[in-house]
Image (spheres, rainbow, N blue to C red):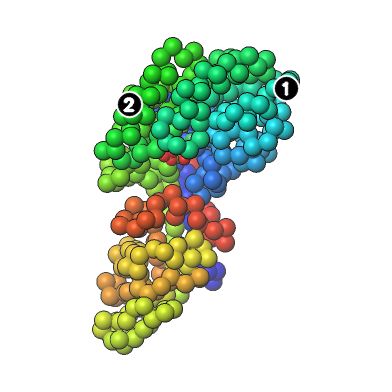
Amino acid sequence: MSRGAIAVLSSENLVHNLEQIKAAAPSKPLIAMVKANAFGHGIRSTAARLERHVDNLGVASIEEALALRKIGIKRPITLIEGVFEPDELLIAACQQFHVVFHDVIQLEWLKGLSLPLPLVAWLKVDTGMGRLGFAVEDVPHALRVLKDCPSIQQPVGLMSHLACADDTEHPLNAVQLQAFAELAKGWEGPKSLANSAAIFAYPQSHYDVIRPGICLYGVSPIKGKKASDFNFKPVMTLQTRLISVRKRMANAFIGYGGTYQCEESMNVGVIAIGYGDGYLRSLAPNTPVLVNGKKCHLVGRISMDMAAIDLRSCDDAKVGDPVILWGEGLPIEEITEGSSIIPNELLTSVQSRVTFHWTLA
Ligand SMILES: Cc1ncc(COP(=O)(O)O)c(C=O)c1O
């Protein structure tokens, strides 16, 4: 019997989520964000399933982009942070990678450059996030450099990223939307602003190209809302099984540090998953799990390979029974509720020793 920690990935739900996104922004070209190993789902397998449904794939580095070309992905790929070294510009041009320019150093690398094929470029502006991008007042100069460069395909796109789109009450949203709208006036090239939350909360942010990330994977993009409010379905279901079920006496300590003491004589189960699999140790002590479809809760600390659960609400549980940590029947938002962990963090933490298994489309 193998350990049993498995991430079941639903091809059907991935495409279903994409359909919900397309319905929210009809006929908008789409850059599907598959960076960070497709938010932990596996960049190659996810991109292969998305490719024929999307216009473009978004990645964070040339290594991620090349990994996709290596498995035969033909669609354009956008380097969302641009290039990190001047040499990457040549690779990008040859491989049809679209390149974001967010800093003056990247413009310098264009000087005297002659590429065999013109490069599709986006100019990234910082409309208020305070991360990457040219300041609004520096945009005319940056655009001039890109316009004057014979290796850059014209017209250049305009891109920005929203810092608080998941919090529709946040005043920064209006500031960023307004700043982008000003720049967009008369901009010749394509314009792109919307991430997952903005696709659903701010139709005025759709412009020419949308960039969904987390919602593709079936997670609610907006605080206080459930995935089901958007008709999203989880792509990843993380599961394992019970490897021990024991009756523990009242007051018995459970796990490292003895942080939990049994309230009464009760069944405690041990599951084969721990922080070494990406089931984060910082999850709350009473995090819910599903045992045979019934909700139970963690007790004590999560250890490297195991975690313990209170089986009082699942009397018939026995060794070998499946246990769901998140996904089908247990939304990931419920796991992170009330903690500083976000679903993105949990998804991207799942380790390669967990078996990944995609369902057939
Ligand atoms: C530039 C950019 N666009 C789009 C996205 C997708 O964001 P979300 O996952 O909120 O849809 C990201 C993700 O971090 C990003 O960095």
Mark sitting on residue 100: none
Front position in the image: 140 or 281: 140
Badge 1: few (under 14), some or many (20 or more) residues near its Cα, within 10 Å?
A: some
Q: Earlier in the sequence, mark 1 or mark 2?
A: 1
Report which quarter residue 265 is drawn in: bottom left
For badge 1, the amino acid type reads: Leu
Counting labels gives: 2
Q: Where's ligand 1: which quadrant?
A: top left
- Can residue 155 be seen in this snapshot? yes
Residue that label 2 marks? 203
Q: Is residue 164 left or right of residue 149?
A: left
For badge 2, the amino acid type reads: Pro
Q: CA distance from mark 1 to mark 2?
A: 39 Å
| Place of residue 108 in the rendered image (x, y in percent of width and height, measured from the top left) | 66, 26
Q: Is residue 72 above or below residue 203?
A: below
Front position in the image: 339 or 333: 339
Report the mark closest to the observer, 1 or 2.
1
Q: Residue at x 34, y 44 (%)?
A: 220
Q: Could you tell me which quadrant the N terminus lies in?
A: bottom right
Mark sitting on residue 113: 1
Q: Is residue 340 left or right of residue 188?
A: left
Work out which residue is located at the far front of the displayed protein and give it: 137
Front position in the image: 209 or 178: 178
Badge 2: few (under 14), some or many (20 or more) residues near its Cα, within 10 Å?
A: few
| Place of residue 212 in the rendered image (x, y in percent of width and height, measured from the top left) | 43, 35
- Can residue 29 be seen in this snapshot? no
